[in-house]
Amino acid sequence: MSSTTQYARERAVATAAVLKACYAAREVQSQLAEAKTVTKDDKSPVTVADYTAQALISSLLFAHFDYPLVGEEDAQDLRSDGQSELRKAICTRADAALAASRDDGDEWKKLGSSRTEGEWLDAIDRGNAASAAKGRTWCLDPIDGTKGFLRGGQYAVCLALIEDGQPVLGVVGCPNLPVDPSQPSGAKGVIFSAVRGSGAVQRSLTDPTEAPIRMHGLGALADASFCESVESGHSDQGTNARIAQILGITKPSVRMDSQAKYCSISRADGDIYLRLPVSASYQRRSGITRRARSWSPRPAASCPTATVSRSTLRKGGRWPRTRA
């Protein structure tokens, strides 16, 4: 059985889940005055879109599978009396997304057209599972790149399936990314998906037709371009610039928020992504302060991993490791 066939149902459900979450997030972003936030212990903002996306995706995944979910959010703060307005906004958004008549896939028919407030909060809390070294686990970052989301920039809805500790399936929605990178002012909204060993594809939010994608085949490092974070606090951009100078790279860097960077590299919008810690304290914090942080890059990293040329594997190359 090929890996594509093996994970066909998981990929279909994951794609449907990410698609609906993308539409919900896009609607929240278009009305940023409503993008109310709370601040978690690590000072990161969480919006209506984060919670709504996790509620929607969790609900659909558990309607079809019994795999545990490692999510980014929980509903503990939402259940407090002081968060009634935010709680109502999330449930209203989730209900509206669930009832929407878009072609989001037959997978959603199992959930009906509405759910109670308690059901939505429970769906968010189902993301509290611990990662497991054995078996299958879903990994979700409902809105990666929250600061980009709040400023109207790039963000991503990221979902991965982990099997025995290794990513085998990744689906990433980038609602603000151009469908055609050669037409940056054209249609926007792309979903990327990849099954390990079977390549990666992209489709638009509005058209289910999938097209295969590949990374650049570079003849020389000097022909490459860097892809970097917009936020200078996320990576040491000065060191990146020095590395580019040493390698003879002169092309301007492509800068964007979120895991959209991985997806852009997977379809040859850019070639190299370095995330160098800006300080020792940043390095220590990464991967331990938030439950899903260690899994966070896995969904999007599955795309460039899956697009590695088969010739590399035939020559004895190994799949690249993905690290947080």
Image (cartoon, grey):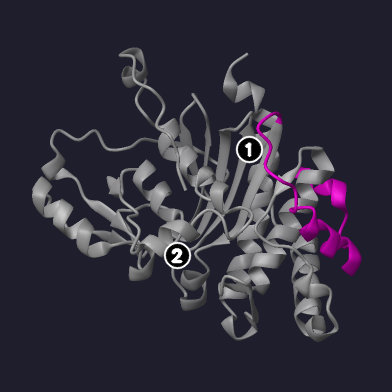
Q: Is residue 106 left or right of residue 263?
A: right
| Residue corresponding to mark 2 | 154
Which residue shows up at 27% across the image and 45% down it?
Answer: 271
Task: Give how far across and how far down residue 48 sits, in percent.
Answer: 67, 73
x, y (%) of residue 236? 29, 62
Determine if the magenta segment contains residue 77.
no
Instruction: Decide which of 135, 117 is in the foreground and name it.
Output: 135
Inter-mark Cα distance, 2 to 1: 23 Å
67 left or right, relative to 271: right
Q: Give the quarter of the image for residue 320.
A: top left
Element carrying mark 2? loop
Look at the picture and state if 28 lies above or below 70.
below
Task: Find disc 1 in the rendering and name its residue.
Answer: 161
Contact, mark 2 vs mark 1 (Cβ under 8 Å): no
Tell me if residue 219 can be seen.
Answer: yes
- 31 or 121: which is nearer to us? 121
Q: What stretch of residues is rendered in magenta? A: 106-135
Q: Is residue 105 visible?
A: no
Location of residue 82 in the rendering, given as x and y in whole percent from the top left corner: 80, 86
Which tag, 2 or 1, sits closer to the chain's start? 2
Q: Position of residue 185 (x, y in %)?
A: 36, 65
Answer left or right for 5 relative to 127.
left
Q: Residues within 10 Å of mark 1 (few under 14, many from 20)?
A: many
Above or below: residue 232 compared with residue 270: below
> Which amino acid type corresponds to the residue marked 1 in the rendered image?
Leu
Q: Is residue 253 left or right of residue 266?
A: left
Which residue is depicted at the point 49% across and 60% down? 285
Q: Residues within 10 Å of mark 2 (few under 14, many from 20)?
A: many
Q: Please name the residue shown 81% across and 78% down the image.
A: 88
Answer whether residue 127 is magenta in the image. Answer: yes
